[in-house]
Amino acid sequence: MTDPVARRARVGVFCYFGLCGMTIGTWAASLPALADRLDLSAGRTGTVLLLISLSALVSMQAAGRMSDRWSSRRLTWAAGPLHASLLLAPALAGSYPALLVGAVIFGLGFGLLEVGMNAHAVEVEVRYDRPIMSAFHGMWSLGGAAGGLVTSAALRGGLSVQALLVGTAITMTVLFLLPARLLLPGRVGRRSVAVSSEPAVSSEPAAPRRGRVQGAILLLGTVMLAGAICEGGAMDWAAMHARRVLGATADLAPLSFTVFSVAMTTVRLLGDRLRGRLGGGRTLRLAGALAAAGYALVLLAPSVGGAAMVCAWTGWALVGVGLATVVPVAFSSAGADPETAGRTIALMTSFGYGGLLAGPAIIGHLAEATSLRTALALPCVLAAFVAVAGPRSIAALTARHTPAPETTALENAS
């Protein structure tokens, strides 16, 4: 039975993910109104978003070292209210140059919190000794949706976008302070099912072993990058595919993204049981296969006549179901070694964030050079790569933390 400390910490991490999602959701939903207030062109708005992403990537690397040195608990405790309060920087910007500075500041805080709460989520999962990571990311999605709904209602009610963002920054800063006491009191040990408390006895030199571990981590990072490109492709191009390739009406086209988003959020909330049954490797194999099949249906949709939209929606649903578990599995596997969990999770976060940032742009340029239908073949291939390479990376990391036969024999004898 799970101890009360772990149960409280799980609630605390749920709160952090939900509040972070709501803060980001409010910011994203407010962006069109903010662009109107400062008279920003599409290019300038894109530059603001790019600076947030780049500054977040920079702070993620520092956050990994902070987590390993000071503990994920301390980093999460500090980064939560900091992230929310830094929303004041873009909220109070009165000009485009000031908004650029504010975007960098806001992105730095976001990167710190992303690494901190994911690293602490891994520690809570270790304490539970069963998969619980997927539901945390589902909570982030729910928080984002809630932020969008609140923003829409507030702006419709006549509140100015500046007042909304300032109010959100102040409110979220206070709310982030509340779950801090629920977090784990200190660093936990390694996952009991994958790590021995005794040093493994092996004739293999340490350097080659370390090299293989780093190779497995980089392979897992590449898998996460591929999954993120597939996810970014669905997020930014699903509705566009319906409109430009399938000829859907303007009001019907966004449903492609809605189908994908609902499928992904649902599976993230319920996917931990699946991973508990299948294990990380087989979960990634199934995830990649489902996502590849989904993209294949999307590619097939223009050829099925009147059933094109149904075929595409089925495909986007499969893409969402498949990709939902890639990030949780990658984070859980990356955090298996508590001594380097922060840095490894920071690396995984950078791969994932980089894929979400670069994926839509890559698909867009391919679409311009060929066609959108042809360009969407890229995420289909990358999803198949996840199915093939994902299990291999998980197997390599698991082998790194599995006791050698001699060690097991000694433990059984004792």
Image (cartoon, rainbow, N blue to C red):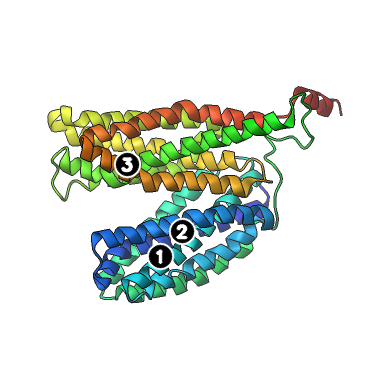
Q: Mark 2 or mark 3, which has the lower sequence index?
A: 2
- Which percent across, then down, holds residue 225? 44, 40
Q: Which residue is mark 1?
A: 103
Q: Are marks 2 and 3 in contact (CB under 8 Å)?
A: no
Q: Secondary structure at mark 1?
A: helix
**Quadrant assignment for the N terminus:** top right
Toward the viewer: 281 or 88? 88
Q: Amino acid at mark 1?
A: Ala
Query: How busy is the neighbourhood of tag 3: few (under 14 within 10 Å), some, or many (20 plus)?
Result: some
Q: Which label is found at residue 363?
A: none
Q: Is residue 184 visible?
A: yes
| Label number found at residue 362 | 3
In the displayed structure, 64 sits above or below 363; it is: below
Give me the residue at 44% from left, 64% from top.
104
Give residue 224's position: percent from left, percent from top.
47, 39
Q: Position of residue 200 (x, y in %)?
A: 77, 30
Spatial CA span between label 2 and label 3: 21 Å
Residue that numbered label 2 is attached to = 55
Q: Quadrant of the C terminus?
A: top right
For the residues labelled 1 and 3, say whether their Cβ atoms are less than 8 Å apart.
no
Q: Residue at x 39, y 32 (%)?
A: 383
**In the rendered structure, which amino acid carries the disc numbered 3?**
Ile
